Amino acid sequence: MNKHLLGDTAVLLGRSLRHIARSPDTIITTAIMPIAFLLLFVYVFGGAIETGSGSYVNYLLPGILVITIASGISYTAFRLFLDMQGGIVERFQSMPIARSSVLWAHVLTSLVANLISLAVVVGVALVVGFRTGAGVLGWLAVAGILVLLTLALTWLAVLPGLTAKSVDGASGFAYPLVFLPFVSSAFVPTESMPGPVRAFAEHQPVTAIVDAIRDLFAGQPVGADIWIALAWCVGILVVAYVLAVVTYRRRVA
Amino acid sequence: MTLTQRQPSMLPVMSIPQTAGQAEAPAIRVRNLEKSFKQLPVLRGVHLDVARGSILALLGSNGAGKTTLVKILATLLRADAGTARVNGFDVAGQAGQVRESISLTGQFAAVDEILTGRENLVLVARLRHLADPGAIADDLLRRFSLTEAANRRVATYSGGMRRRLDIAMSLIGSPPVIFLDEPTTGLDPQARIEVWQAVRELAGGGTTVLLTTQHLDEAEQLADRIAILHQGRIIVDGTPDELKRLLPAPEVEYVEKQPSLEDVFLALVGTETEKADR
């Protein structure tokens, strides 16, 4: 490994964070859609959804957090795409810097931006009645899962950022990710779904992640869900990371 | 037809640090370089030497392979065959040392639009691991008449200012070899003259410059030597005078000198570039 990896990543991270600080609208637009879903489901659809005991906003929030991350990472693809187009990546690559620092800076920027968006969404949820009995450990576990999921999806977002031919292609890939929670236990319990849909919903990563976070917030024992959730996050992270690094090497020689 | 006779450079030759121990070796040495994209051969056996401290203009029409050659020399692309050494280092085997020795200014100004001009310079100085990036940035801002625009976002800069900033970024760390890929494409005549001035200063400081261009007058203005890349090969390599002698001696004619439109334009808008940029 290059001895400058940490230092170069820090310098480039500073650059990307400046980008975010100068266009805070990217964080706001990231948070607006999940907040809209949150309000829509709590105040419009929620009354008709039967989730058992407890308030619906408590049931809903974990899925909204997943949607927040899914919409946030599209900006990573967007920013990376602009860097590739603008020739600044070529400039960096012709300089004596640690080569992977360019990608790491974008990934860590995504982590910072998403954590801010998540905090905003949780703040709104608290205002509309979200309550949790989770202690410090519970919150840390939730944060850990969300950080892992953000890293996994961000490395996934690096792929379109590197390979897209247009801005729309770079950021459009996130739409399926945003809608994946709708076919999961995020909004309604899977028991109400017809056979094949239910089978898909119960075996896709969002359900395991959402159920684990929900149990952690409720202060209940999490059971196997948290391990399935972690396995999905780590699995996606490893595969996406390897693909991203291979694609990057191919793109920039 | 190869022209190998060297014309003594008029530029002061300074000692250049960080060489690989071959003081007399050219700054850039290319042998038999080949590169194809899929089935399409772009470079078909390129030979080229660039002497230390000189400016070489690489001429060629669109698609002649100029950018491909520059990218291989800047370690951004791998050649299929042949060798290339920059500052004594092999571009394939010693890419790290080559990157320490070079700086690339690509065809499109590779500047960060959201950052200010000063922040762009500081960013590059940090990435080159230099001490006191702020002082380096301030010095370059002065040299390139960008001091007043230093704290403005680059998005508000004119094309000429962007190019100047781009070239200033390339000078950070004083790399002994600089590649300029079509440095004046898309610039107005005034900005072009500013860039030419910057390039001359560079070579005056002992830096080796390889620039690509489609404009013959640009090559004539700047270059110690001109190489013409055509269909993947260097077909001529010589000084501007040597190249001119390839054609039969001109007959002497007396023509009333008319100012060109460019002369008129420059006379009318004046040379106060700093004022015009604002």
Image (spheres, coloured by chain):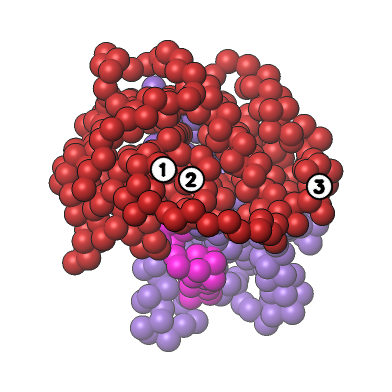
Chain colours: A purple, B red
Residue A165 in the magenta stretch? The answer is yes
Are the residues tagged 3 and 1 within 8 Å (C-beta)?
no
Along the viewing direction, whichever of B11 and A64 lies nearer the viewer = B11
Q: Which mark is residue B228?
A: none
Q: Which residue is mark 3?
A: B270
**Residue at 67% from the left image edge and 48% from the top image edge:** B191
CA–CA distance in space, label 3 to label 1: 29 Å
Are the residues tagged 2 and 1 within 8 Å (C-beta)?
yes
Instruction: Locate residue B206, reporting x and y percent.
Output: 47, 22
Instruction: Locate residue B160, reporting x and y percent.
Output: 67, 48
**Residue at 29% from the left image edge and 15% from the top image edge:** B23
Q: Which residue is mark 2?
A: B220
Name the kind of residue labelled 1 in the image.
Answer: Pro
**Are labels 2 and 1 assigned to the same chain?**
yes
Earlier residue among tags 3 and 2: 2
Magenta range is A159-185
